[in-house]
Image (spheres, grey):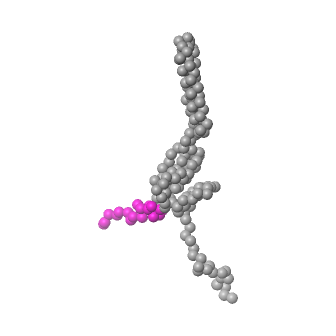
Amino acid sequence: MDPYTSTRPKPSPTRAARPRSTLLYARPGIVVTVDRFTVGRSSWPVAELTHLHTTRGPHDRVAVRAVLVTGGMITGVGLLLGFTGGLHRLTAGAYLMLGAVFLLPVLLAVAGDRWRPPAYELWGRRRGTDELLFSSDDERQFGQVTRALRRAVEMNRYGGWEDPLASVDPWRPMR
């Protein structure tokens, strides 16, 4: 037996080596490569995604309902006092108290947005329709995924990692 030859089986010629896609971002449930964007069970080819833009999702339903109910009740009490003539008999302290109560819906709205802020959403157009691609409450993670996907789209559009200015020979004066 020749010591320079290998006893390992050679790879079959029918099984072509597939080029690996460059990984840009990977976390459990989220993978961004140059070719694909995958979130959970949904996956999109990056070459088909256009018009990427970010927005904030809707406000929390509980907070919106609390503001609407409180605002409606306060408006009802104000109208009832106005029609019964009770506003003429109120003291200055009562007017201050009524003004403070009118601030309650505003405070509820601010507290609701503080405790449960709207989600960050990444939208894109694919085959002529707008699709929600990714949504997250975590601003840092959302920024990382968005940047990775935008890099992937640019790489698909412009053909690779290479910086156009770095690939050009620098200008040198002739001597």
Quadrant for the N terminus, please. bottom right
Extreme residue toward the right, this view: 1
Q: Residue 9 vs residue 147: left or right?
A: right
Q: Residue 80 vs residue 156: left or right?
A: right
Residue drawn at (51%, 60%) of the image: 46
> Which one is in front, 44 or 158?
44
Quadrant for the C terminus, please. bottom left
Q: Kindly indicate the quadrant of the structure image that contains residue 172.
A: bottom left
- Taking the image as drawn, is residue 153 in sight? no
Coordinates of residue 92 in the picture (x, y in percent): 55, 13
Numbered-mark total: 0
Q: Kindly indicate the quadrant of the structure image that contains residue 72.
A: top right
> Which one is in front, 85 or 8?
85
Extreme residue toward the front, this view: 83
Residue drawn at (53%, 51%) of the image: 132
Decide: is 10 above or below 48: below
- Taking the image as drawn, is residue 173 in sight? yes
Q: Kindly indicate the quadrant of the structure image that contains residue 90.
A: top right
User: Was residue 172 drawn as part of the magenta stretch in this picture?
Assistant: yes
Coordinates of residue 24 in the picture (x, y in percent): 55, 58
Extreme residue toward the bottom, this view: 1
Decide: is 77 above or below 31: above
User: Was residue 41 drawn as part of the magenta stretch in this picture?
Assistant: no
Coordinates of residue 85 in the picture (x, y in percent): 54, 13
Residue drawn at (55%, 11%) of the image: 89
Residue drawn at (57%, 31%) of the image: 68
What is the span of residues highlighted in magenta in the rendered image? 156-175
Q: Residue 55 vs residue 116: left or right?
A: left
Coordinates of residue 96 in the picture (x, y in percent): 55, 17
Q: Main secondary structure of the magenta part?
A: loop
